[in-house]
Image (cartoon, helix red, strand yellow):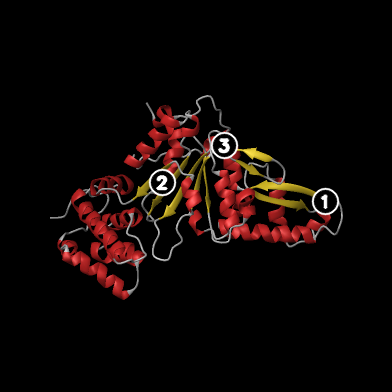
């Protein structure tokens, strides 16, 4: 039985061809974690239990601990289209619900700059499947935060070019609204950075199990298949904690830490194709010590799975294990000399620096042997 057959929530639901492409496909390198099994089982078990339904998940942990990978894996397990929104400090309510833009006449459109014409034409020709931010990101190749700023500029531009004549207005939903209304799995990244309390209130309201969103054109209800997965980095000193009301709307939460060394090695083998478990075990030990040391000394950087994969891959290709440790791991954590010294001392205390110097790691990916 496949994960989809085991966990499918709405067997009768028929996705469109476009929606099917949004359902995440697990790569061969994907390894099912305890967290994935636990969340999938809990959501499936409670899916038809009314007020006991679990549809808002919180994944809280360090960068590189696998939060987004887990959110995507849930999309694959449940057969739900995956999409995401990355929050930023200056989000306003239009970023939560979308925006109404006036449609500029073709005569006035031709008077605008070519870049502005391209963007507005892309918006006017959209079929409503994409959100406004997604359209702007695709056309301009910009980030979500930049797309939000561009949207506000376009709104001002369109308003200035109406000249009092009768205007057609069109509503463009946000990515949140699209997922909410159509029943997708939505990853909400870093909502703790949002500063505006009104924006947080709008997001809180949308996450009610029986919630609704008041759009300028209509009131929409939460789709029964909609799942929200909130992913946020564990708070460091000075970081804003996750809003309490938002946290209260979560029905299941996971503390995302580095996996066990055995799982780290297994995932590295799948991800990189490098199979020297002895070497990978030493690298994993170093990542674990660096992670603990960074936490203990309030060093903001993170030694996570991404660093581990890239370091292991560099070593597999013949790079110096000790030299690449700095470029793939330590300098990602910090470039402060005093903090680097603390990390080095922690490794030396455990004898791990000596292990790097003694072990002959010059092995190619296709030469699955340890040099004598």
Toward the viewer: 182 or 319? 182
Label 3: which residue? Answer: 210
Q: Position of residue 115 (x, y in %)?
A: 69, 60
- Density class for disc 3 (Cα within 10 Å; few <14, some 14-19, many ≥20) is few
Cα distance between the residues tagged 2 and 3: 28 Å
- Residue at left 30%, top 58%? 311
Asked whether residue 358 appears in the rendered view, the answer is yes
Reading the chain from its start, which is encountered first: label 1 or label 3? 1
Asked whether residue 25 appears in the rendered view, the answer is no
Which corner quadrant holds the C terminus? bottom left
- Density class for disc 2 (Cα within 10 Å; few <14, some 14-19, many ≥20) is some
Label 3: which secondary element: loop
- Residue at left 73%, top 52%? 101
- The image's mark for residue 167 is 1
Question: Extreme left residue here?
Answer: 372
Against 177, residue 165 (above or below) is below
Q: Position of residue 156 (x, y in %)?
A: 73, 61
Label 2: which residue? Answer: 69
Q: Position of residue 77 (x, y in %)?
A: 43, 34
| Residue 241 shown left or right of residue 282 in the figure | right
Disc 1 to disc 3: CB gap under 8 Å = no
In this rendering, the label closer to the viewer, 1 or 3: 3
Disc 2 to disc 3: CB gap under 8 Å = no
Reading the chain from its start, which is encountered first: label 1 or label 2? 2
| Residue 51 shown left or right of residue 166 in the figure | left
């Amino acid at each position: 039985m496949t994960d989809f057959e085991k966990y499918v929530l709405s067997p009768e639901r028929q996705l469109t061809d476009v929606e099917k492409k949004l359902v995440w496909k697990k790569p061969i390198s994907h390894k099912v974690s305890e967290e994935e099994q636990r969340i999938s089982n809990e959501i499936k078990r409670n899916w038809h239990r009314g007020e006991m339904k679990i549809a808002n998940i919180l994944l809280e942990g360090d960068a590189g601990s696998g939060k987004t990978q887990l959110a995507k894996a849930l999309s694959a397990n449940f057969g739900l289209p995956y999409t995401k929104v990355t929050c930023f400090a200056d989000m306003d309510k239009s970023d939560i619900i979308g925006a109404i833009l006036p449609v500029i006449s073709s005569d006035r459109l031709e008077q605008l700059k070519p870049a502005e014409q391209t963007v507005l034409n892309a918006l006017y020709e959209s079929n409503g499947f994409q959100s406004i931010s997604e359209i702007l990101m695709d056309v301009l190749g910009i980030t979500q935060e930049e797309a939000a700023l561009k949207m506000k500029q376009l709104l001002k531009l369109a308003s200035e070019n109406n000249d009092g004549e009768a205007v057609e207005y069109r509503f463009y939903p946000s990515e949140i609204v699209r997922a909410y209304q159509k029943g997708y799995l939505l990853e909400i990244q870093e909502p703790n950075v949002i500063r505006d309390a009104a924006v947080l209130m709008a997001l809180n309201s949308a996450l009610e199990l029986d919630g609704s969103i008041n759009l300028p054109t209509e009131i929409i209800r939460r789709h029964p298949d909609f799942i929200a997965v909130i992913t946020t980095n564990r708070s460091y000193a000075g970081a804003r904690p996750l809003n309490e009301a938002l946290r209260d709307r979560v029905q299941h939460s996971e503390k995302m830490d580095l996996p066990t060394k055995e799982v780290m090695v297994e995932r590295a083998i799948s991800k990189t194709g490098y199979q020297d478990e002895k070497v990978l075990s030493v690298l994993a030990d170093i990542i674990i010590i660096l992670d603990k040391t960074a936490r203990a000394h309030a060093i903001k950087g993170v030694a996570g799975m991404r660093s581990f994969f890239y370091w292991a891959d560099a070593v597999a290709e013949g790079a110096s294990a000790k030299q690449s440790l700095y470029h793939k791991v330590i300098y990602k954590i910090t470039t402060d000399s005093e903090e680097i010294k603390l990390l080095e001392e922690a490794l030396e205390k455990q004898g791990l620096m000596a292990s790097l110097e003694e072990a002959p790691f010059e092995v190619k990916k296709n030469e699955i042997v340890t040099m004598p």
